[in-house]
Image (spheres, rainbow, N blue to C red):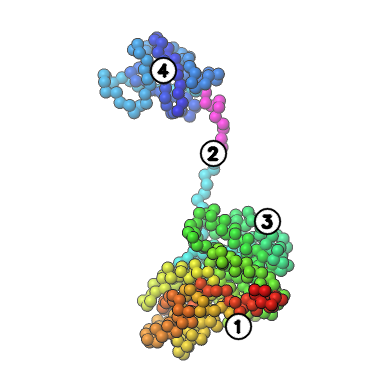
Amino acid sequence: MLCIKAVEQLGGKGVLTMRNNNFSSKGLKRIVVPGRVIPKVWYKRPKSLTSKKEIKMTEQPKEVKHDAVPHEPVTEDIKHDAGPKEPIVEQEIDLGLDDFLPDLDMPAETAAPVIIADKHDAHVKFSFVGIGQGGCRLAEAFYKLGYRRVCAINTAQSDLDSIDLPVDNKLCLSTGGAAKNRLIGKDAVEKRSENILTFMKKCFGPEFDRIIVLATAGGGTGSGGFTPLIKLCEDLLADLRIDTGSESRIGLFLAIPPNSERDRMKNAMNALRDVEKLLAAGKLTPVVLIDNERIREIYPNATMGDAWGRSNLNIAGLFHTFNILAGAPTKYDVFDQEDYKSVLKSGLVTCGAMPVVGDLATAFRENAGKTVLMSGVELSTAKVAACLLIGSADSIDALDWAVVQDAYASLNRVVGGCTLHRGFYAAKRSLAAHTLIGGLKMPAKRLDEIARLAGRKDWDA
Ligand SMILES: Nc1nc2c(ncn2[C@@H]2O[C@H](COP(=O)(O)OP(=O)(O)OP(=O)(O)O)[C@@H](O)[C@H]2O)c(=O)[nH]1
Ligand SMILES: [Mg+2]
């Protein structure tokens, strides 16, 4: 609090003491003296005086009634009951603050951040960032399904040009490709980390629940870049203050080369080692491994003209189905949103769909393992799973209740007796069972095979 002593020269020799922080915009001190009629006078503080020094009045006021004793000035909200009401006169003292205050530019009014909405009403608000050619193609597939917080990063502009996303959602790191060298991919992301962070902020907006990184393991850009990109996603969540609680909100889709791409298996092996570490550290969930060896079996009709487009749409669609159905209304058993979240946070996850023809229990038992995206996963290591039956209302209505119970009991044995969520949804399509299975162990046999193709004895060698 500023304390100023001013000599009041009102005929007497009293000292006027002010205690008030209320300065006018001109750096003038406003005081109110009750019971006095004081003409408008300015008490200008000489520059040489500090606030605690005496300030001499520059003009003698006229017609002043005063007592012999000095008066304390008071603020306007103090009521004086005693005696007749007397006029209150406001005065301003120029303390010369303008001479000391710096001229500041006030911050510009900031525009409210733009919230980016998906084209559908799915339960979890995912943001997707694809890196490398295959990762960007997967990002494009999620965009086609109606997700809008989607962006793509590559090291080669020509590859980015072929990705069907708005131009503002694509970022070229401009190192002219990584030539299947993981170190170049890693370096490119690390060197442009600030640009990538700003880019993701712009493409995702301030509101979403989880980020999914999309990449392939066999190349250079995606395979080497996804690990530092995950670190940037952590920074982004922290910057946006998205509450992650104790669990990771960052997931990964990673495509593994087919066995025919033997020259890429070393990259795949090293990328999978990174995944293993991140999973063990609890830094990633869900992780969906897309085994291209399996993709060739379940979607065999890929053509050169649309080499990946169709299978990527299927892969993205399998995952998206659960996000649409979680909590959706149904007259049968519901797969609720908490059921869905329990799978999303379970670590290594796989998904698939199988047509229901013939006996339901046999279909569940024999096909669950063959139709998921990763080959070699041991479903018996699962910690949580969901199996949704989707088909026309007629086909669901016609199912025998006891047969359905048997089929789920059978599937429950396949997934090692873990929690198995169910759901039944009527839609205009032939009856199919969709599975989402989580908390899995890494596929040991497939990892051994990948290590051998990469020239090692086995995964642990
Ligand atoms: N599932 C799937 N796999 C893909 C796709 N595109 C490429 N792949 C696989 O990914 C590997 C090639 O990786 P790319 O994504 O092209 O490589 P990159 O990350 O661009 O790395 P550089 O080209 O070295 O800069 C191959 O093993 C392919 O089998 C795709 O769209 N979907
Ligand atoms: Mg490439």
Q: What residue did someone put label 4 on?
A: 16
Circle 2: residue type: Met
Residue neighbourhood size for the residue with mark 4, other residues' Cα within 10 Å, grouped as few (<14), some (14–19), many (≥20): some
Mark number for residue 191?
A: 3
Measured along the vertical axis of the image, is residue 349 above or below residue 86? below
- CB atoms at circles 4 and 3 under 8 Å apart? no
Residue neighbourhood size for the residue with mark 3, other residues' Cα within 10 Å, grouped as few (<14), some (14–19), many (≥20): few
Tell me which numbered mark, 2 or 1, is placed earlier along the sequence: 2
- Please tell me which residue is depicted at 41% across the width and 17% down the height of the picture: 16
Q: Which residue appears farthest toward the top when viewing the image?
A: 11
Q: Which residues are magenta?
A: 96-106
Tell me which numbered mark, 1 or 3, is placed earlier along the sequence: 3
Q: What residue did someone put label 2 on?
A: 106
x and y percentages locating residue 377 in the rendered image: 56, 78
- Please tell me which residue is depicted at 66% across the width and 77% down the height of the picture: 458
Q: What residue did someone put label 1 on?
A: 297
x and y percentages locating residue 218 in the rendered image: 67, 72
Mark number for residue 258?
A: none
Tell me which numbered mark, 4 or 1, is placed earlier along the sequence: 4
Q: Is residue 148 visible?
A: no
**What is the secondary structure assignment of the residue under circle 4?**
strand
Residue neighbourhood size for the residue with mark 1, other residues' Cα within 10 Å, grouped as few (<14), some (14–19), many (≥20): few
Measure how far apart labels 2 and 1 are at the Cα level. 63 Å
**What is the secondary structure assignment of the residue under circle 2?**
loop
- CB atoms at circles 4 and 1 under 8 Å apart? no
Q: Quadrant of residue 105?
A: top right
Left or right, 447 with reference to 121: right
Tell me which numbered mark, 3 or 2, is placed earlier along the sequence: 2
Measure how far apart labels 4 and 3 are at the Cα level. 65 Å
Measure how far apart labels 4 and 2 are at the Cα level. 36 Å
Q: Quadrant of residue 37?
A: top left
- Please tell me which residue is depicted at 61% across the width and 61% down the height of the picture: 229
